Each structure stands twice: as C-alpha cells, then as structure tokens.
Image: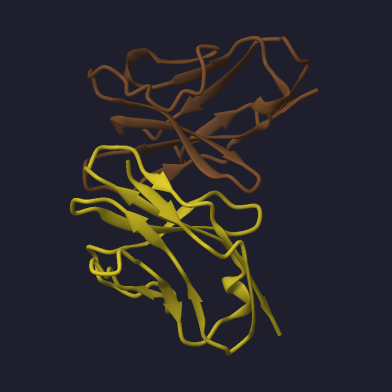
Chain colours: A yellow, B brown
Amino acid sequence: AQRVTQPEKLLSVFKGAPVELKCNYSYSGSPELFWYVQYSRQRLQLLLRHISRESIKGFTADLNKGETSFHLKKPFAQEEDSAMYYCALSTDSWGKLQFGAGTQVVVTP
Amino acid sequence: GAGVSQSPSNKVTEKGKDVELRCDPISGHTALYWYRQSLGQGLEFLIYFQGNSAPDKSGLPSDRFSAERTGGSVSTLTIQRTQQEDSAVYLCASKMGAESPLHFGNGTRLTVT
C-alpha cells in the first residue's frame, strides 16, 4: 500500500533563511505528488503539484523517483509562510489522496 | 457558491449518540471526498463519491460510519454510537474533473464527551 512520510512535525526557521520540508513516499508505480497548505483559520488548499513544475509563492518541489522524495523548498522564508504543510500522493486522477502527517512551519522574525 | 460548505462548524455530542455532518460541494463538482483530521495523525481518507459510480468506502474505520450523496450533490456523513476516539475535524472536499485540484471545506469539529 502507498504511504507518505513527513519526518518533521515542526520546523522553526528565521525569516530570510532557507526552508526545506521533507516528504518521502512509498509506491511502486508512477504517483502524482502534491503539497497542500493550511494557514491559520483558513481551509486546506493546494500549494503545488509535481506535474505543473511551477513555483508558487517562491516554493518549489522536485519529484525524485530514485529517492522516492518530493521535498518542498523555499530559499528565503517569510513570516506569512507560517502554516501547516501536507504532502500528498495520488495513484490515479480520480482517486483518493494519501496525506502525510503534516509539518508545522513557524517563521520567526 | 463561494466554495465547499460544511455544517455544522462545531458539534459537541455525548458518547453513544448519533451525529450527522453535512457537506455542500461546489456546484458542478462530480467528485466528493470525506477526510478526518486528527491532531498528529494528518488527514485520514474516509470515503469518496464519483458521479454515479459506487463509492469507495475503503477508509471508513468501522461500520458505525456511513455516508451518502443524494442527487449527486449534497453529502451526509453519519457516525452512529459515537465514541471519544471519533473526536476530530471532519473535512469534505470536491473537485470538478480528473485533473482538477481538490477544494476543501472548513470542516466540522466534532467533540465527543
């Protein structure tokens, strides 16, 4: 069965410092990977997906099939990046998303 | 509508009571999902409806949990004989097409006392 692992429950960084959220998955096929974000008192929303290969709010994520990873990176963290981030995997377009446990990011000035 | 709407936003119930949680998806979205969000547990898939196909119930934790979707729109998640471990935020999400992103509601926070 597929599994998504986010090893860090909490990540505390200073404003302007780089931030990297780790995500590893287990699935033998070709998955689709996503990052979702939940800001305080807001609903969960899509941040980016690997097939788009785009940068959203300065964040990028590269799918590494060899390492089965989809780490989220931003070179210079901002205070407004403080949020809960979830990595998610889908094995088909209509199917359910398998989420990781989430990483709480706190950016301090 | 503005987005996926869930009601109630908060529900406190006594152990052993039944509860119903409602989800109004975005108009035109054919797929609807229920997830459970527990502290430290991430999001746990519960059930998924797609068009007229049989729902994928593989995530329902026990037979106390059931869900239906009437008329291809509104969905109700029912938990019978609630237990304290059912306390969580129940999230509903919908999407329009296979390649579309999921749109989440604000969730229903269920507390079983």
Relative image position of residue A83 (x, y in whole percent) = 60, 64
User: Looking at the rendering, which quadrant does residue B13 occupy?
Assistant: top right
Q: Name the residue rendered at 51%, 50% in the picture.
A: A44
Q: Is residue A78 left or right of residue B100?
A: right
- Outermost residue on the left side: it is A29
Where residue B3 appears, x then y in whole percent?
46, 41
Q: Based on the displayed image, in which of its 4 quarters is residue B68 positioned?
A: top left
- Foreground residue among A109 and B86: B86
Closer to the camera, A86 or A82? A86
Give the quadrant of residue A2.
top left
Residue A6 picture location, percent across and down = 49, 60
Above or below residue A82? Residue A94 is above
Residue at figure coordinates x 46%, y 27% from the top left: B24
**Residue at the location (44% across, 20% down)?**
B75
Percent position of residue B73, x then y: 37, 22
Q: Residue at x 66, y 45 (%)?
A: B39
Residue B81 in the figure: left or right of residue A89? right
Total count of labels: 0
B74, A30: nearer the viewer: A30
Could you tell me which quadrant the C terminus of chain B lies in?
top right
